[in-house]
């Protein structure tokens, strides 16, 4: 009977393949973890910059209000103040957008890390299934070999008894 031209997949090949998949999933998890850590730093930096900008704007507003209360502002100062207020608000809005983008990037990176962690768990479980099956096959072969040896010893002893 002719053999199929398809190569057969042995347990050893399957185990190696599953192990390779587990290694790749572990590498993907490391990359996802690093990406999430970088996204956390970017989020913290964006938040710090936004807080710093808000504090600066608040300090300038407070100082201006104090000068206004002391009647130290001229009409030109008030016009300049309106222009500054508009620019300051645009900067605060830009910082808020940057902070929101950083939060979104962090959420996406955290989701990707969770997915990579889940995939690693699945790949590892698949590898362990093959390893356990391979151990079971090896144990069954060992027991079968031991049984054959016992049969041979028993047959030899029986043959010796007959010849006596």
Image: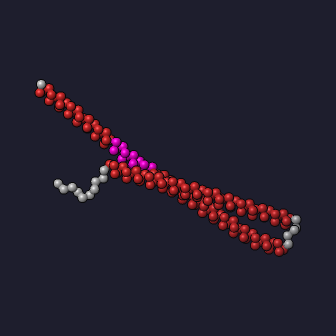
Quadrant housing residue 65: bottom right
86, 116: nearer the viewer:
116
Give x and y (percent) for residue 17.
37, 53
* Residue 128 is one of the magenta-drawn residues: yes
Residue 116 seen in the current view:
no
* Residue for point 57% across, 60% down: 105
Task: Residue 120: tell me if it is visible.
Answer: yes
Quadrant of the rendering where the N terminus is positioned: bottom left
Residue at figure coordinates x 88%, y 67% from the top left:
71
Quadrant (top left/top right/bottom left/bottom right) for the C terminus: top left
Q: Tell me where the magenta segment starts and ends, as one range.
A: 121-135
Q: In this view, does 82 lie to the left or right of 50?
A: right
Q: Is residue 82 left or right of residue 15?
A: right
Residue sitting at x 41%, y 47%: 125
- Asked whether 78 or 37 is in front, the reply is 37
Measured as percent of width and height from the top left, residue 33 is found at 53, 54
Q: Is the magenta stretch mostly helix, strand or loop?
A: helix
- Residue sitting at x 85%, y 72%: 74
Tell me how many marks there are. 0
Residue 128 horizontal side relative to residue 95, left or right: left
The x, y position of residue 117, in whole percent, is: 48, 52
Horizontal side, residue 103 vs residue 148: left or right? right
Q: Does the magenta stretch include residue 26?
A: no
Q: Residue 120 location, x and y as percent?
A: 45, 51
């Amino acid at each position: 009977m002719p053999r199929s031209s398809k190569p057969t997949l042995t347990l050893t090949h399957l185990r190696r393949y599953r192990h390779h998949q587990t290694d790749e999933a572990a590498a993907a998890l490391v990359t996802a973890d690093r990406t999430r850590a970088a996204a956390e730093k970017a989020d913290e930096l964006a938040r710090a910059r936004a807080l710093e900008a808000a504090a600066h704007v608040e300090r300038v507003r407070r100082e201006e209000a104090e000068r206004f209360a002391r009647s130290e502002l001229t009409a030109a100062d008030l016009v300049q103040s309106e222009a500054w207020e508009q620019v300051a608000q645009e900067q605060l809005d830009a910082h808020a957008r940057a902070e929101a983008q950083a939060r979104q990037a962090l959420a996406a990176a955290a989701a990707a890390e969770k997915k990579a962690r889940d995939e690693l768990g699945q790949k590892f479980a698949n590898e362990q299934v093959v390893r356990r099956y391979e151990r079971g096959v090896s144990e069954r072969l060992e027991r079968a070999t031991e049984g054959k040896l016992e049969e041979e010893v028993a047959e030899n002893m029986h043959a010796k008894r007959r010849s006596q």
